[in-house]
């Protein structure tokens, strides 16, 4: 989609009466911004990344200089909407993030600060920790994580996912690319709820996310349950950041006879339950994140 149309839209909106400063500095997505201009409130910077659903730019909040990320999402690619109490039907990603970022928030989940509804796309204003990079890029530049840092990442990731579960949200696309890591503190934040859904006890019969992180039961029976599938993706992520490879050649090939190996350099402590070059059977997915 051409950015020129957005610029013309911003210019038209700029002629309208600006709302009060208290409305311009929303800390959550609690109010639907129907008549405000993104350009008036946020300065757009360079492109940070581009994916299947849209593009993300660096940005800054004009009122106080806060670094933000500005995500543009095409409505053609994401037509789903969910009802949120007091706000009507919102775009899927906005609705899910509204649930998980409302107070009290989780420090390991990227916060939705604001959003704008446009005729052909919607715009998400997200917090942008600085300096940071996605965990996949961090590993590519620095090598596999040592066990100490991997444990720190894992603890924060589980806390983020348990928070999402408590808000009734299934992320469904856990992977290193969807984790931001601070290059100073090594704190992480879970991002990108574009593949998410509401939690339910019954099985899901539609998959959204990254196939390499999908659970074996999806390939065998074309159905899966929320929490076991999440735990599987966490395990694949942990193995990936520790070993710089996927645990199996493909989840679609995993059976009860599949073997999982770990490098000899990893710890043999009881807290880790790691095997060395001797192989061990692939465990059944855990029922919860506890």
Image: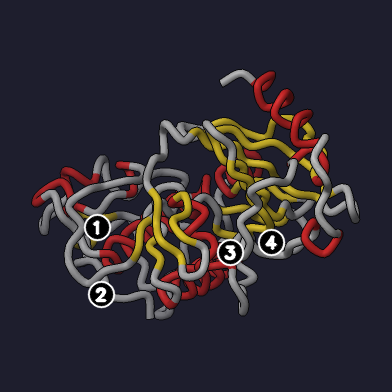
Taking the spot 74% from the left edge, 41% from the top edge, the residue there is 38
Disc with the residue nearer the chain's start (2 vs 1): 1
State if disc 1 and disc 2 touch (CB < 8 Å): no
- Evaluate whether residue 264 shows in this view: no
* Disc 2 versus disc 1: nearer the observer: 2
**Of discs 4 and 2, which sits in the foreground?**
2
User: Is there CB contact under 8 Å for labels 4 and 1?
Assistant: no
Q: What is the distance, in whole Å, between disc 2 and disc 3 at their CAs?
A: 22 Å
- Say which of marks 1 and 3 sits in front: 3
Q: Along the horizontal axis of the image, is 77 left or right of 182?
A: left
Please give the label number shown on residue 287.
2
Q: Indicate which disc, 3 or 4, sits on the residue closer to the N terminus.
A: 3
Q: What quarter of the picture does the C terminus occupy? A: bottom left
Q: Distance between the residues labelled 1 and 3?
A: 35 Å
Q: Position of residue 28 (x, y in %)?
A: 66, 64
Which residue is tagged 1? Answer: 279
* Front disc: 2 or 3: 3
- Labels 4 and 1: the sequence-earlier one: 4
Q: Distance between the residues labelled 4 and 1?
A: 32 Å
Q: In this rendering, would 162 be left or right of 12? A: left
Lower sequence index among marks 1 and 3 = 3
Checking the image for residue 16, the label placed there is: none
Q: Work out which residue is located at the far right of the displayed protein and give it.
A: 64
Identity of the residue drawn at 68% across and 35% down: 48
Rounded to the nearest angstrom, the CA distance separating label 3 from label 4 is 14 Å
Label 3 SS: loop
- Secondary structure of the residue carrying tag 4 is loop
Which mark is on residue 109?
3
Q: Would you say the residues marked 3 and 4 are in contact, meaning their CB atoms lie under 8 Å apart?
A: no
Label 3 Cα crowd, 10 Å radius (few <14 / some 14-19 / many 20+)? many
Labels 4, 1: front one: 4
């Amino acid at each position: 989609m051409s950015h020129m149309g957005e610029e013309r839209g911003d210019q038209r909106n700029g002629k309208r009466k600006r709302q009060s400063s208290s409305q311009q500095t929303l800390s959550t997505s609690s109010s639907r911004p129907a008549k405000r201009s993104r350009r008036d409130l946020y300065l757009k910077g360079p492109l940070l990344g581009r994916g299947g659903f849209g593009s993300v730019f660096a940005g800054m909040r004009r009122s106080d200089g806060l670094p933000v990320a500005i995500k543009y999402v095409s409505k053609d690619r994401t037509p789903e909407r969910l009802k949120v109490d007091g706000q009507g039907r919102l775009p899927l990603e906005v609705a899910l993030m509204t649930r998980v970022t409302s107070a009290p928030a989780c420090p390991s989940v990227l916060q939705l600060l604001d959003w704008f509804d446009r005729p052909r796309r919607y715009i998400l204003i997200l917090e942008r920790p600085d300096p940071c990079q996605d965990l996949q890029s961090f590993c590519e530049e620095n090598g596999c994580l040592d066990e100490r840092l991997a444990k720190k990442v894992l603890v924060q990731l589980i806390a983020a996912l348990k928070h999402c579960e408590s808000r009734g949200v299934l992320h469904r696309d856990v992977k290193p690319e969807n984790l931001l890591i601070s290059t100073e503190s090594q704190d992480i934040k879970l991002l990108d709820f574009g593949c998410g859904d509401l939690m339910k006890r019954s099985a899901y019969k539609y998959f959204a996310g990254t196939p390499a992180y999908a659970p074996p039961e999806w390939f065998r029976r074309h159905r899966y349950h929320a929490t076991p599938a999440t735990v599987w993706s966490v395990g694949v992520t942990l193995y990936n950041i520790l070993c710089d490879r996927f645990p199996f050649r493909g989840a679609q090939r995993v059976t009860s006879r599949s073997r999982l190996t770990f490098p000899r350099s990893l710890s043999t402590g009881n807290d880790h339950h790691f095997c060395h070059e001797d192989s061990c059977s692939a465990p059944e997915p855990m029922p919860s994140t506890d």
